[in-house]
């Protein structure tokens, strides 16, 4: 049987953070890891096993692994322990997935990897925008005037 400590040591999020976090912002991956842990724990709680004729156990019973059960309810302790394991495994998988996903996203450049789409805004016309021979306006990137073939000054 695998103990929780060995599972965290082998699959836990800390080694992932150490491998992928850049030196300038390691806290971002930790934040995504915590967020992923919470999301994974909630999903694990929602997917916990149910007891026939009773349904799923409440959160308080699951988090205490059934230690608060009395009388005949003690028979539900194994289901409470299994439900707790679902929550813990969901939290670990969520933390690893979110931290790893954010690291991969950052390694690929993230949202800022491509230059933003910008439109050239025409500013006020400069002296270099009009032909000194005939006065017609130069198009952007044109070296010679289209009207009189005069050379555009540099």
Image (cartoon, rainbow, N blue to C red):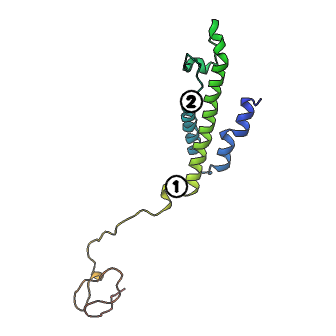
Residue at x 65%, y 27% (from the top left corner):
85
26 vs 94, nearest the viewer: 94
**Picture quadrant of residue 147:** bottom left
In the image, what residue occupies the spot 62% across and 18% down? 64
In the image, residue 100 lies at what x, y percent?
A: 61, 47
Which residue lies at the image location 63% right of the left edge and 25% below the top edge?
84
Residue at the (63%, 30%) spot, across then down: 88
Pick whichever of labels 1 and 2 is earlier in the sequence: 2
Query: Where does the C terminus fall, quadrant-wise?
Result: bottom left
In the image as oriented, which residue stretches furthest toward the right? 1
Residue furthest left in the image: 135
Position in image of residue 35 (x %, y %): 54, 37
Vertical relation: 129 (above or below) 97: below
- Residue 142: x %, y % from top left: 34, 85
Q: Pick the residue in front: 128 or 96.
A: 96
Left or right: residue 21 versus residue 136 is: right
Helix, strand or loop under label 1: helix
User: Does 1 appear above or below 117?
Assistant: above
Image quadrant containing the N terminus: top right
Other-residue count near label 2 (Cα within 10 Å), few / some / many at <14 / 14–19 / ≥20:
some
Label 1 or label 2, whichever lies nearer to me, is 2
Quadrant of the rendered structure where residue 15 is? top right
Q: Position of residue 33 (x, y in %)?
A: 58, 40
Judging depth in this view, the residue of 52 and 138 nearest the camera is 52
39 left or right of 16?
left
Task: Using the rendered image of the protein, determine whether residue 143 is visible from the camera's viewpoint.
Answer: yes
Q: Which residue is mark 2?
A: 47
Q: Which residue is mark 1?
A: 110
**Tally of numbered discs:** 2
């Amino acid at each position: 049987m695998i103990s929780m400590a060995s599972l965290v040591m082998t699959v836990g999020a800390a080694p992932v953070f150490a491998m992928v976090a850049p030196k300038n912002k390691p806290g971002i991956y930790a934040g995504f890891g915590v967020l992923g842990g919470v999301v994974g724990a909630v999903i694990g709680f929602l997917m916990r096993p149910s007891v026939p004729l009773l349904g799923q156990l409440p959160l308080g019973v699951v988090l205490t692994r059934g230690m608060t059960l009395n009388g005949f309810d003690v028979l539900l302790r194994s289901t409470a322990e299994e439900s707790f394991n679902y929550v813990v495994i969901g939290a670990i998988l969520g933390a690893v997935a979110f931290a790893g996903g954010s690291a991969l996203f950052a390694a690929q450049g993230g949202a800022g990897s491509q230059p933003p789409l910008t439109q050239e805004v025409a500013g006020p016309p400069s002296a270099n925008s009009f032909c000194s021979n005939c006065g017609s306006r130069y198009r952007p990137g044109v070296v010679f005037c289209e009207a009189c073939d005069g050379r555009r000054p540099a």
